[in-house]
Each structure stands twice: as structure tokens, then as C-alpha cells.
Image (cartoon, helix red, strand yellow):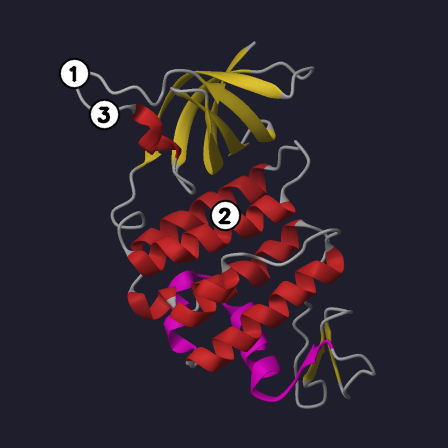
């Protein structure tokens, strides 16, 4: 059957001489793979349409969907939102690639979730429109708030007594746990502040240096790895830590 849906590009692989196999997170069907024939052919009118399938691209789609097939097909596709600078700004593009890799590791079942889809869609649009002072903290914000859709999250109960963040339990406690997976001091306080952010523009009020961002990103990766099987290590993380 033919359906209209929105999609977010997660990955593109070359197939044959002219085609692509693209992983898309769709609003109607969750994560799906699509074979797109001839999209890498250039014509007299201009280049091929493969540039629409860059990671993080937001698309309007008309798709053929068969639940019995692992590889679907597209009938029509066009930009759903045209980024102003996300593909051209080095820092924003790196943050977007980090977000895409994180989504690839979390989105494994073809189950639709409209609220999650719109959270992700809005997150990329906000990133595209954000000032540089916001972009530096954006990976931390996205990483923390994405967990709410996967059945595990950090409960923000930081106070004068509970100042240690136990990453295994995802809660703030009053003393260091016996295992090494915890944050305290300025790192647990910063996490609490990031959890309180509801709109990305508020991120410019949270002042962190490069070393703090590096440690927090590494700790949040550990938090994901404790709760998602075979999560592994993120390839974009070391580059992002160096840049931000």
C-alpha cells in the first residue's frame, strides 16, 4: 500500500552504480530501510537527488509499505525542511552526526512513536537555528532528554542532600556508590541543570568548559551502555569531545 509520511535520514549506503539503500526513521512506521533506484544519476537539468539522503535530512515521503518485507521502496520524496546551515556549519554538522549515531544505536525495532519522531525532528530544526553559544551544550541536552523515550532516564532529584549521580540507577543519592559509575560535584550539578532545560535557547545560560563537556559526554555514553544491550562506543564522540 502507498502511504504519506515524514522521515529522518539516519544512514545511506551505495547500492550498485546508481542506487542507494537508506535507513529512515519514519513517523508512520518507525525505522525502515528503503531501496532507491537511480538516485545517484546526474542529468542535464542538474545533479542527482542523492544529496537529499544526507544523515539528519528531514523529508516528506510517499512510500510503498509491506510489513512482510525488510526492504521497502519510495514512490516520491522531497525536502520536508531545508536547513539554513546545518549541512555547512562544521560544528553543527558534527553535532548532528553525533545525534544520528546515537539514534542508530537506540532505534532498532520498526515501531512507530509519533512523540519520539517529533522530538527528534524538532531537535534537528532547533540545532539548525541555534546560536553558537547553544550548540556547545546541545549534545548534552539531546543525550539526556532522548532517554525519556526508551524506558530509562535520570530522575532530577538533585538537592543539598542528594548531590551524587548514580549512573547505574539513574538517580541522585547522598553518598558515592561502591561502583565507579557516578558523577559528583560540578558534574552532577551541571547534569541537574541540563535536565531542567525545556527549550534549547536556555542552554546558553549553562556555562561549561571543554573538559566538563568531555567528561559529561563520556559519562552519558556509559549511562546508555548500561541500559541498551550492545550499545558499544560511539565513533563520533572523540571528535565531538575535541571540538566542543
Q: Which mark is residue 44?
A: 1
Q: Residue furthest front?
A: 17
Observer able to see residue 26: no
Q: Which residues make up the magenta segment?
A: 181-206
Q: Residue at x 70, y 60 (%)?
A: 225
Q: What secondary structure is marked by label 3?
A: loop
Report the mark closest to the observer, 2 or 1: 1
Q: What secondary structure is marked by label 1?
A: loop
Front-most of 226 and 175? 226
Distance between the Cα atoms at labels 3 and 2?
25 Å
- Marked residue nearer the N-terminal end (3 or 2): 3
* Neighbour tally class for label 2: few under 14, some 14-19, many 20 plus, Cα within 10 Å: many
* Neighbour tally class for label 3: few under 14, some 14-19, many 20 plus, Cα within 10 Å: few
Q: Which mark is residue 217?
A: none
Residue 28, percent from left and from top: 56, 27
Q: What secondary structure is marked by label 2?
A: helix
Circle 3 residue: 47
Circle 2 residue: 100
Q: Residue furthest right?
A: 178
Residue 219, percent from left and from top: 62, 71
Q: Is residue 242 above or below residue 184?
A: above
Amino acid at each position: 500500500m502507498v502511504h504519506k509520511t515524514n522521515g529522518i535520514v539516519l544512514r545511506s549506503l551505495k547500492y550498485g552504480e546508481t542506487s542507494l539503500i537508506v535507513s529512515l526513521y519514519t513517523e508512520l512506521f518507525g525505522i525502515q530501510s528503503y531501496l532507491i533506484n537511480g538516485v545517484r544519476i546526474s542529468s542535464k537539468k542538474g545533479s542527482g537527488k542523492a544529496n537529499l539522503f544526507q544523515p539528519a535530512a528531514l523529508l516528506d515521503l510517499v512510500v510503498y509499505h509491506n510489513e512482510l518485507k525488510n526492504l521497502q521502496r519510495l514512490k516520491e520524496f522531497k525536502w520536508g525542511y531545508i536547513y539554513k546551515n546545518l549541512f555547512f556549519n562544521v560544528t553543527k554538522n558534527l553535532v548532528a552526526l553525533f545525534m544520528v549515531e546515537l539514534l542508530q544505536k537506540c532505534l532498532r525495532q520498526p515501531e512507530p512513536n509519533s512523540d519520539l519522531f517529533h522530538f527528534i525532528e524538532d531537535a534537528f530544526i532547533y540545532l539548525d537555528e541555534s546560536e553558537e553559544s547553544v550548540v556547545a551544550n546541545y549534545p548534552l541536552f539531546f543525550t539526556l532528554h532522548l532517554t525519556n523515550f526508551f524506558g530509562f532516564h535520570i530522575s532530577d532529584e538533585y538537592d543539598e542532600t542528594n548531590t551524587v549521580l548514580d549512573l547505574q540507577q539513574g538517580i541522585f543519592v547522598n553518598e558515592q556508590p561502591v561502583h565507579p559509575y557516578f558523577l559528583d560535584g560540578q558534574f552532577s550539578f551541571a547534569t541537574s541543570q541540563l535536565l531542567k532545560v525545556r527549550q534549547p535557547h536556555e542552554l546558553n545560560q549553562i556555562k561549561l568548559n571543554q573538559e566538563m563537556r568531555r567528561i559529561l559526554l563520556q559519562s552519558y555514553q556509559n549511562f546508555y551502555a548500561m541500559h541498551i544491550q550492545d550499545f558499544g562506543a560511539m565513533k563520533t564522540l572523540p571528535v565531538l569531545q575535541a571540538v566542543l
